[in-house]
Amino acid sequence: MTFKIISKKQLSENVFQMDVFAPLVASARKAGQFVIVSPNVDHGERIPLTIAGADPQKGTIRLIFQRVGKATAQMADLHAQDAMGYVAGPLGRPTHVEKFGTVVCVGGGIGNAPLLPIATAMKTAGNKLITILGARTKELVILEDDFRAISDELLVVTDDGSYGRKALVTEPLKEVCGRAARPDLAVVIGPTIMMKFCCDVTRQFQVPTQVSLNTIMVDGTGMCGGCRVEVAGKTKFVCVDGPEFDGHQVNFDAMMKRMNAYKALEQKAYEQYRSHTCRIGLNHK
């Protein structure tokens, strides 16, 4: 099967959106699940990406990714009508969705992408949906219109105050949790440190909180052990036991240490790839 890129657009400086032809995945996927993809047919790194949306009638899935390493840089260099090496999935445990009552969804940066299908499913199930989106700057706020279309209330904050309210997401989250009718569930996806502090807030108000730890996944099959985390004092593997967990039970400090394990190697591979592509570009001029 050819996993053709049907469309591609750039959402911010380093964030890209692709609709990829993968009909079997599109028909089977559920909110919270992910795929393993490779930008090359014969070689290259395999990476896990959350399915940000799907259209079973067209046979497409939507992938949103940030250019941070070699594999995502290779994907960013692909164009519409190019083909991905392969797309395998859907993988991971789907989000538990039911009518809880009021659900507050909190997204930080690229975390808005995996949050969107969960928020959509929660709204479809009949929940009142409050959404809080945060980013460092206005340019890094993604998918605002998509969330606005499904949210009963939408709050946007930026670190520098260039858009929305100048604040961290924890501030409006604390206000929402402190209302007389507090949320029945919080769903938080974003940088690890953001999820940690959001869970500190919701714990104070006894609001059940689920987080997605998708950013720590490596091979997506449970074989490499790279996504090992501690939840409620027990070892879990994000790709097969998650990617979603009770945020009040996650050892975020240990997770942050593990996430730094490959950072230097990832940066080196990315720099080598960019250097190589720049040389090729110069030689072709």
Image (cartoon, helix red, strand yellow):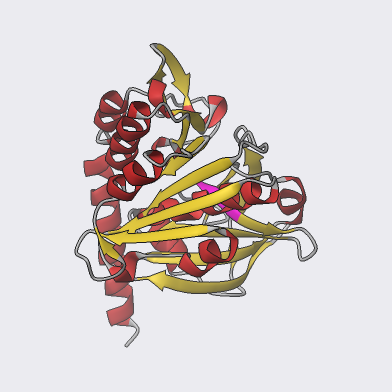
Instruction: Find the magenta span and give its range.
Output: 47-52
Q: Is residue 276 above or below residue 23?
A: below
Q: Horizontal and vertical percent for residue 104?
A: 48, 45
**155 within the magenta span:** no
Q: Horizontal and vertical percent for residue 210?
A: 48, 33
Per the picture, the main secondary structure of the magenta-coloured stretch is strand
Q: Horizontal and vertical percent for residue 195?
A: 34, 38
Specify the farthest residue to the top: 233
Q: Is residue 142 left or right of residue 98?
A: left
Specify the farthest residue to the right: 57
Name the residue located 36 percent from the left edge and 27 percent from the top edge: 203
Specify the farthest residue to the front: 180
Name the residue located 41 percent from the left edge and 53 percent from the top edge: 132
Closest to the observer: 183 or 190?
183
Asked if residue 171 can be seen in this view, the reply is yes
Name the residue located 53 percent from the left edge and 29 percent from the top edge: 242
Closest to the observer: 16 or 280?
16
**48 within the magenta span:** yes
Closest to the observer: 115 or 99?
99
Quadrant of the image occupied by residue 197 = top left
Quadrant of the image occupied by residue 271 = bottom left
Specify the farthest residue to the left: 160
